[in-house]
Amino acid sequence: MTPAEIVSTEASEEAGVRGKLSERPIGVYCYEKMISGEASLPCIVTVYPLKVKNLDTEYKEKNQRSRKWFTRKQAARRVDEPDLAALIKSTTIKGLKT
């Protein structure tokens, strides 16, 4: 699978969203993922935009996650990673026509 195909699968499993995914990422950010107790693992994340077309009522992780929509400005305020917040606020997504 391409990275974009993996992103599409994850979006479907984790949030029940399907739509048009850009093959081109909009950026990357880094964070420390806590794996147990005080142990962490450095992670580099590539972010791909997805124009949501469908919302599934049933999806794999429905009982583990809740879905809520935000504006970009609201989303940027709610994430913990400063680099991701900056990416959300500053990105203009091209090539995802309705």
Image (spheres, rainbow, N blue to C red):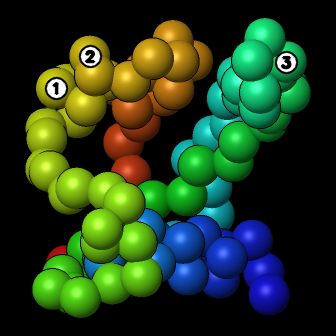
Label 1 is placed on what type of residue? Answer: Gln
In the displayed structure, 57 sits above or below 28; it is: below
Q: Residue 80 versus residue 26: which sits nearer the camera?
A: 80
- Indicate the position of residue 62 as horizontal and vertical percent values: 30, 72
The residue that disc 2 covers is 77
For this view, does 6 lie left or right of residue 71? right
Residue at the (25%, 31%) spot, across then down? 75
The disc placed on residue 63 is none
Query: Tag 2, which secondary structure?
Result: helix
The residue that disc 3 covers is 39
Whether residue 3 is visible to the viewer of this picture, yes or no, is yes
Label 3 is placed on what type of residue? Answer: Ala
Residue that protrudes farthest toward the front in the picture: 37
Query: Tag 1, which secondary structure?
Result: helix
Residue at the (77%, 32%) spot, across then down? 35
Q: Residue 28 versus residue 98: which sits nearer the camera?
A: 28
- Indicate the position of residue 74 as horizontal and vertical percent values: 16, 26
Do the CB atoms of the residues marked 1 and 2 lie less than 8 Å apart? yes
> Separation of disc 2 and disc 3 at Cα?
26 Å
Give the mark nearer the N terminus: 1 vs 3: 3
> Separation of disc 1 and disc 3 at Cα?
30 Å
In the displayed structure, 49 sits above or below 70; it is: below
> Separation of disc 1 and disc 2 at Cα?
5 Å
In the displayed structure, 80 sits above or below 8; it is: above
Mark 1, other Cα within 10 Å: few <14 / some 14–19 / many ≥20 = few
The residue that disc 1 covers is 74
Label 2 is placed on what type of residue? Answer: Arg
For this view, does 83 lie left or right of residue 76? right
Q: Residue 37 versus residue 91: which sits nearer the camera?
A: 37
